[in-house]
Image (cartoon, helix red, strand yellow):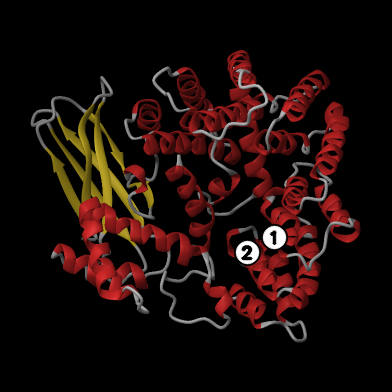
Amino acid sequence: VKRIQDVLVVRGSQFKEDDGPMSHPIRPDSYIAMDNFYTSTVYRKGAEVIRMYDTILGSEGFRKGMDLYFKRHDGCAVTCDDFLSAMADANDVDLSQFARWYSTSGTPVITYSSNFDAEKGNLTLTLSQKSRSDEPLLIPVSVGLLDKETGDEVVPTTILQLKETTQTFEFPGLKGDVVPSILRNFSAPVKLVPASGAVDESDLAFLASRDTDGFNRWDSAQKLGEAAIIKMMNGDAYDETLSRVIETFGQTLQDKSISDDSIRAYALILPSEATLAESVNVIDPPAIRNARKRVKKAIATKYKTELLAAYNDLTSAIEADGDTFRVDGVSVGRRRLRNVYLGYLCSIVENAEEQKEAAALATKHFNSATGMTDKLSALTILVSMSGEGESAREAAIEKFYEDANGDPLVLNKWFAAQADADLPDVLDRVIKLSSSHPDFTLKNPNRCRALILSFTLNAAAFHDEEGKGYEFLGSILEKLDKVNSKVAARTTASSLIGWKRYSEKRATLMKAQLQKLKNMPNVSNDLLEIVTKGLK
């Protein structure tokens, strides 16, 4: 579960940074403002690079390297090269090729293709890499093979070291055709794409229901869901893909072999809007949201009875604990899975009766919550309700605020939930909160992030084609730069500088705000560095 959570952040924010004007190696060559050095690339991708040492050397080898590192450098100022040297010397290996990760920006792409020779019982797997490095990187690619008929793992997880631009690996002695499970446990921070350009949906469906690697089982379901959503968004034929998504969902929902509710919860969640945005050439946030909602509703409609029964079973299990709030793994998993079920059940809101039903269920969930996890989950659903759910929405917003009783952390969640609402007037609501609510101030960095940054991450609303979201952010940043330039710079970096990924109309409007910020008198170095790079 932790691995899935980490990868969601890497793919959602770090890959985005790698693909934009703020792209830089994990060891940046230069910067104007030191505060802009603390990026997702330095922290998240940097951590993934450290993790690859463990993947390449093994746990024992990594420990040997750490022991030597501390023996040599405990209490000293050190460099990345010192760490690499300790790992290499302790294990008597040459890591000079691996060192290229420290100076290479961007996200490497690995393409793959495979061929099974039935007569020889031999599988050939061809991997190719492409990156901004002048020479090939050393990339650990974790691979396992599953029998296509039985689903049994016939080749356990094996670490392939991709050192050339293109390499072919052979797996002999196979009794039947297999499905490769590639990049298990996300063994390297790369993008994995088929050489043919089109994913094999039957293989994805197979892996999503049969893979013995928990991470890749989840990832395959994500890729299958992504394929259906993007096809629907593009107006392509999607019926067969959607059927596979729905069938895979049903198998995961009812699979008795999954004992961890957290694993089941993540396996049932569709890819996020941010993840989907990274998979298209031109980002259209409203189109992404609408297509994702349609797929989610189709799944929920198909399995409404089963979802409600599972939701009620978990509710009974949680209620059996009484008023005791438990934080053990089983209890956390129950809450996580129950909240996923709630999200699906409340996605069916086409008519007045369905709106009433969804509002009643979410309100009951909200009122009976014994902890913040359940209460906030219900609130994030209720804040987007309209029609017959409008009164329930306003009641929940008011109740959550009252229950917060001035607690700053809880109030941050209250502001963030409203900024992320899926409502046509969400910008008006955010403007009102930012301009007149007594608990909002630009002088509080966390409060500012909760409302302003959360709104910019509400992509479908922020990227309104008329540019009203951009205008609002520009006016806020003009004031914020005078109060807290660091927050202003980071809010800009995550919101406006990726304009090249959007339509010409949106891009023009985003650039106009960047230019306006750059031309401000006495603009801070923090903000100036970001907008200057963003305009290139």
Residue 477, image x, y percentages: 75, 70
Which label sits on residue 244?
Answer: none
Residue with the mark numbered 2: 499
Residue with the mark numbered 1: 506
Residue 378, image x, y percentages: 72, 33
Is 257 situated left or right of 129 in this image? right
Q: For numbered disc 1, what is the local secondary structure?
A: helix
Is 442 situated left or right of 132 in this image? right
Q: Residue at x 61, y 18 (%)?
A: 320
Residue 5, image x, y percentages: 49, 45
Q: For numbered disc 2, what is the local secondary structure?
A: helix
Foreground of the two, 260 or 474: 260
Q: Residue at x 40, y 60 (%)?
A: 47
The correct choice, above or below, for 59 with respect to 347 in the image is below
Which quadrant would the C terminus be assigned to in this image?
bottom right
**Residue type at mark 2?**
Trp
From this viewpoint, which residue is outermost toward the right? Answer: 436
